[in-house]
Amino acid sequence: MSDPLTADAPPLGLPPALHSVLLAGGGTAGHVSPLLATADALRRRLPGVKITALGTERGIEARLVPARGYDLRFVPRVPMPRAADASVVRFPGALRAAVEAAGRTIDEAGAQVVVGFGGYVSSPAYLAARRRGIPIVVHEQNARPGFANRLGARLTRHVATTFSTTRLPHARCLGMPLRAEISRLDRAARRGQARAELGLWADPVTLLVTGGSLGAQRLNETFAARSRALGEAGVQVLHACGAGKGFLPVADPDGPPYLVREYVDRMDLAYAAADLVVCRAGANTVCELAAVGLPAVYVPLPIGNGEQRVNASDVAAAGGGVIVDDAELTPVWVDVVLIPMLADPDRLARMAAGAASTGRRNADEALVDLIVKAFQARGRRR
C-alpha cells in the first residue's frame, strides 16, 4: 500500500540544493511557449526556485516572459551565416560576444542547470554552460532539429524531443511542454464562457484561423476573400492574423461575427470556443491542438526543411486533422472543402477523437524530471 503522504508526489522530487535554473529560447512562440510551460512546472514542483530566462530583445519573449512573471535577460541575436558574405567574417566575433553575455547571466543567476529550447540564444547558452561544467538539458520541439539543438545534443546526454521521429543523440521522446491552461483545458466545459469573453455568439459552428505569432499571408488572403461566404454558411470566425497584418472582413452585419485580432493572448479561450482550426503546422500548435482534442486543417509553411508537414503527420494519420498544401488553400477550396466540413458535426467529432488520441498533456512534468536527473548527475563523466 502506498504511503498517503507521498502518494501524490511526482516521480522525481526536486532536491533542495537545486535552486536556480536558466531557460534559454526565443524568437517565436514555438520556442517561448514550451519555455514558459517548463518554468511554470518548475515553480509548481519547487516554490521559490529562481528561474531566469535568456532571450533576445527583438523576439516575442521580450513581451511574453516578463508578462508571465519571470526574469528575462538578453543576449545578442547571432544567426548562422547563410551565404559566403561579410556575415561569415563577423560570425566568430558575434558568437563570442553572445557566449560571453550568456556566461555573465549564468554567473549572475547562479544557474545550476541550463535548459535550451533552440533558437538563436540556445547555442551561446550551451557553450557558456559547457565552459563552466554546468549540466545542460536540450528540448527539441520540431520533428527536424535545428542547428542549436544539434549542437546542444553533442554536449549532453539529457536530450528530449517532442516527436518520436526526431533524430538526436541520446534523445528520449517526452512530448511538448504545454502551459497548464492548455494541458488542463476542458473544451466542452469552457465553450460558453470562452465564446462570450471573445465576443462570439453562443451557438454557431466556430472556426479559428491562425497563422501563429507572426501571421500567415496565405491564410489571411484566402479567408479575407471568403469572410462573407463563411457568414452566409452560418459559420462564425475568430481570425488571428499576426502583428501589423489586420484587415477589415466583408461580412453581413446581421450574420455571425468574423472577428479579426492581430494576436490572441488567451489561446485557451480560442481553443475552447472553436470547433475547427485552420493553421500552420508549427510543433507547438500541433501538440496543443492534439492535447485538447481539437480538429484542424494544417497548412505547412512552404519554405524551410519541410519540418511542418512532418510535425502534423502523426495527428493526420490518426484522423485528427488534414494537411493541405499552401498553394491549395484558395477561396475555391474554402467553398468546396472547408464549408462542407464545418457543416458535418459527425466528421468534426471523429476528427476531435483522432486528435485527442495522439495528444500528450504531461510533458512539462516529464521535462522537469529530466532537469532533476541532469542536476543529480552533475560531475559525472559523460
Image (cartoon, grey):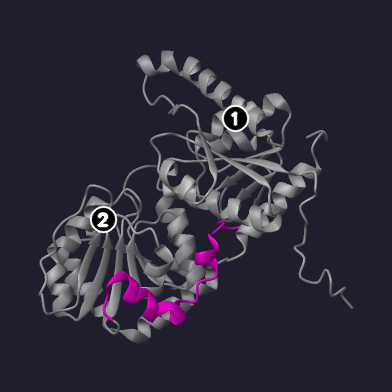
Disc 1 or 2, which lies upstream in sequence? 1
Residues at badges 1 and 2 in contact (C-beta under 8 Å)? no
Is any atom of residue 173 visible in this view?
no
The residue that disc 2 covers is: 241
Q: In this view, does 112 lie to the left or right of 307?
A: right
Report helix, strand or loop for mark 2: loop
Q: Which residue is drawn at 55% across and 31% down?
A: 123
The image quarter in which residue 241 lies: bottom left
- Quarter of the image that includes the N terminus: bottom right
- Magenta segment, which residues? 173-201
- Relative to 100, residue 242 above or below: below
Q: Does the magenta stretch include residue 40?
A: no
The residue that disc 1 covers is: 105
Q: Does the magenta stretch include residue 186?
A: yes
Percent from the top left, x then y, of residue 290? 48, 67
Which residue occupies the foreground of this view, 369 or 172?
369
Specify the amino acid type for callout 2. Cys
- Relative to 112, residue 298 above or below: below
The image quarter in which residue 117 lies: top right
